[in-house]
Amino acid sequence: MLSLVVVIPILIAVLLFVFSTNTGARILAIIMQTVLFGISVWLVFATRAGDIVTFVGSDGDVLGIVLRANSLSAVFILLTTFIFLAATIYTYKEDRDMRTFWFLLFLLEASFIGLFLTNDLFNIFVLVEVSTLVTVILTLFDRKQRNMYYGKVFLMANVVAAQFYLLGLAYVYRLTGVLDIYRVTEAIALTDRANLVLPYVLIMTTVAFKCTLIPFFSWTPKAKIYPRSPTVVAAILSGLQAKTALYLFLRFQEIFAPIAATEFFMVIGIIAGIFGAFMAICQTNMKMILAYHTVSQVGLIIIGVSGEAGNIGGLYHIVSHAMFKTTLFLGTGIIFHSYGTGNVYKIRGVFRRMPVVAVGMIAAVLGIVGAPFFIGSVSKYFVAHNVSFALNLTVILISLGTIISFIKFSRMFFGKSDLYGDIPVAENCRTIPVIIMGAICLAGGVFGPEMIYFLFRYSVDIDFLGYAQKSLVFAGSLAAGYVIYNLAVKENHTLKRVGDVKFSFKSICASLGVFFGVMLLWVG
């Protein structure tokens, strides 16, 4: 069954490559992806009884390829198959020749699922590099000159970052003599701490880079990958690819438990959360606002999984972020197609012209800002639950930055559009994923504890008074955000200039070296 989970996306890729213009093939692809989603739901239930292991090509767990699904990887696979199902429906009526695009898209899904299932450290390297290469090709799909430049920067930076992992992997193999994750974990538990510092720091430098934590306010949006990518690719980059890096973060923190730098990554998460929110405030492009909020929300997730009160808040915020950010990216694709611009100051009247899309996106906005009864409010509640005053204040500050930028973002839903005449109506295949995922943003808040129990088998209770208190804090933050936006942010050209700062390839490499050096000093 585990092999089937990896094979089905490849079969879909081949099917759509060969029969891309055939309506029946597209419907069959949606059916196959739905089946795959159903298998992933089954996997969530099946892993509750223990890990599921499949040996591929060998009966041994040292030399053979081993696929292993546990309760955590099953949740990530569930997210992956659901978001790719939404992508399949969203692109159903694309009128251009999409066969190469679809082939690459579902090859990317197979690499993600393989990454969640592999039990080998070297296979992780291979699958990460495959997904990176496929992502670069997808972002360059329109073949525009500037896209080619930014794609080249993105690829070269990832190649440099991957070398840190490869060197760390070689060091791990030298210490333990194996690459099987569970055997490596057992060996590391018995290894002297001094011998673990260098491999741990090398590997985590790459993982932090993949999590968009280097530089602290992220190089990825500045490489223009998000705004220049096809809508579905941008949604997957934010909604899923960042989650693969977070999955690796969780796995390697577990593998290197004797030396895991929890406090260091708590600090990094705080910096990323604050600067990501600030840089989002400085943007005027829809996708760039969302891109920088990927950085800020990843910072919030790192705070949660490294937090003082356990990691359930961070884990649930991974799910929350995947839902509301995918919804928002898919919605911005519809808006851009209709209005012909991504500038939030030039778009008005979305609610009047496309109410269904607006409702789904507003639900996602309420989720990301942490409005009561929406999914983000529950995950943020547990991220900041029973933590110190300083850390709670930090989460409030990050949320305030999120509110300010989404006050700017949400202006386009209301008012009257300056555009007259007919605006292209979005097809149902595009609006359906947006409204369904918007509904999940609401359901995930109303039924938050039940959702957490279903996904993570972790029983939680929300204290009514505590939740009411945090709702009052949200109301105060909303009022403060509105005042700050109107007094200091609206049409502020200085902030726009800050938002336009670009990173060169040299500065990206330098930031990698600085991060490595600082972490080495901290851990060592």
Image (cartoon, grey):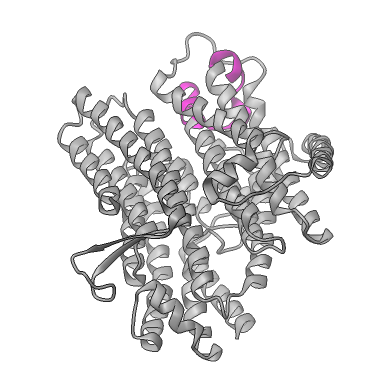
Name above or below for residue 340 compared with residue 157: above
Name above or below for residue 343 compared with residue 394: above
Nearest the viewer among 296 and 514 is 296
Q: Is residue 339 on the magenta stretch?
A: yes
Name above or below for residue 262 compared with residue 400: below
Nearest the viewer among 110 and 218 is 110
What residue lies at 55% left-to-right and 70% top-to-bottom?
A: 511
How many dots with numbers? 0
Residue extending farthest left = 18
What residue lies at 61% left-to-right and 75% top-to-bottom?
A: 261
What residue lies at 79% left-to-right and 36% top-to-bottom?
A: 478
Q: Residue 469: name its quadrant.
A: top right
Q: Is residue 370 left or right of residue 54?
A: right
Q: Is residue 401 on the magenta stretch?
A: no
What residue lies at 80% left-to-right and 43% top-to-bottom?
A: 470
One can see residue 60 in this view: yes
Query: What's the magenta region?
Result: 331-354
Q: Is residue 139 left or right of residue 305?
A: left
Nearest the viewer among 52 and 260 is 52
Picture coordinates of residue 401, whole percent (x, y): 72, 46
- Quadrant for the C terminus in the image: bottom right
Picture coordinates of residue 488, whole percent (x, y): 79, 41
The rendered magenta stretch, by its main secondary structure, is classed as helix
Picture coordinates of residue 502, whole percent (x, y): 55, 55
Q: Residue 362: name its quadrant.
A: top right
One can see residue 321 in this view: no
Q: Is residue 479 left or right of residue 198?
A: right
Picture coordinates of residue 414, whole percent (x, y): 66, 20
Nearest the viewer among 1 and 163 is 1
Residue extending farthest front = 49
Q: Residue 68: name its quadrant.
A: bottom left
Name above or below for residue 524 compared with residue 507: below
